[in-house]
Amino acid sequence: MLRSGVSRRWQESRPAHQEHIKAGRGAECHNAAMSPSTLSLTRPDDWHLHLRDGDALRAVLPHTARQFARAIAMPNLKPPVTTTALALDYRRRIVDALPKEGPGADFEPLMTLYLTDRTPPDEMCRAREAGIVALKLYPAGATTNSDAGVTDIRKTYATLEAMQREGLRLLVHGEVTDAEIDLFDREAVFIDRVLQPLRRDFPGLKIVFEHITTREAAMYVAAGDEQLAATITAHHLLFNRNAIFLGGLRPHYYCLPVLKREEHRLALVAAATSGSPKFFLGTDSAPHAAVLKEHAAACAGCYTALSALELYAQAFEAAGALDKLEGFASFHGADFYGLPRNTGRITLQRQPWVLPESLPFGAQQLKPLCGGETLNWQLIDEVVHEEPA
Ligand code: DOR
Ligand code: ZN
């Protein structure tokens, strides 16, 4: 049994404050009378995260480590993390960048390899023995640093066979890259052209359909077997594609896969709050220097790690489903990966606060998504003590 400073789960009820619904932001209603003022959760994990390297890594890592016990560290560095040796080096740099004590000191990065056309099948045994948990499939050209990605999935079949044998999971950026397919349709087309044949050919391979953005993907995952699951970001739960265009082009809302229509956002909210163990938290927090976001060719990625849980709490509360947040954030991912659930706890308080507009990012600046806006929930830093057995 663990104790946290604020241990009651659903404390006093209090009317929820009126939410200012902006265009581009979802508009569900919720039962105000059911809103608690304190939320205590088993410490969650982030199953999809971009930590970068060097100064950028040092700038962003404390934000994640303060909230999450573990996170999947995505391998799309420059150059990409394509071998076990590179992943172990990267792991060491992440661990070295952690706070030495206090919140986050015990954070555990979960390492992944970047799948290429030439990833050797015999690397899979080494990877598993070194504790690598998964490989990431980036279709070449689909997103940030994906140039070395897979040009044709059939070229990776011998490696996928070895992954299936070794119990390594496949994490999928699920978009086709064909120029003739409309950008907003690329995820749905990927299901038919790539994911369905892949699942047929590798029925024993555990696959995470990452950062799903469409109704089609949510339905496909919900209907799949227990080998298939999906992560959902906070920004895809909170915003639809209007957010990118309202009041001028807003590059901080640009990510890949791009935000979709409201009907898709609603399907994602329904999936995330359904209680299904096939859907879990993956922020896809992807920091880029502000100068590269506010640019003629803006980089794709939303920086949400600073306030990740608060953003998810906002989305779940808007859907009247705060009681489903713990499963989504703290249990389903660990269960899918076959890893133990965390034992510590974290506490969120209903305490409106304004997100900073800008953060230091090495010599540059980083602009968090929703910077300058007010969030309803705030994570409390507190030491979580283990009671004597
Ligand atoms: O928006 C995104 N940013 N999507 C991705 O798939 C990659 C990520 C990044 O690394 O910046
Ligand atoms: Zn990502």
Image (spheres, helix red, strand yellow):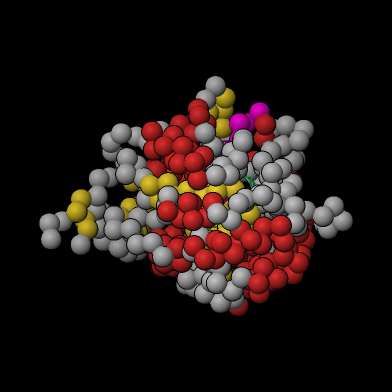
Image quarter where the N terminus lies is bottom left
- Vertical placement of residue 108 versus 38, above or below: above
Res. 230 in view: no
| Residue 54 % position (x, y) | 50, 29
- Going by the picture, which residue comes out furthest to the left? 388
| Residue 17 % position (x, y) | 46, 55
Q: Quadrant of residue 79?
A: top right
Res. 112 in view: yes
Q: Nearer the viewer, residue 47 or 102?
A: 47
- Vertical placement of residue 312 versus 332, above or below: above
The secondary structure making up most of the magenta span is loop
| Residue 157 % position (x, y) | 66, 62
- Vertical placement of residue 192 versus 301, above or below: below
- What's the residue at 60%, 40% (across, down)? 80
Is residue 71 rendered magenta in the image?
Answer: no
- What's the residue at 34%, 34% (across, down)? 99
Q: Nearer the viewer, residue 349 or 303?
A: 303
Image quarter where the C terminus lies is bottom left
- Going by the picture, which residue comes out furthest to the right? 180
Which segment is the magenta one? Answer: 284-291
* Apparent side of residue 218 relative to residue 30 in the rendered image (left or right): right
- What's the residue at 49%, 56% (across, down)? 125
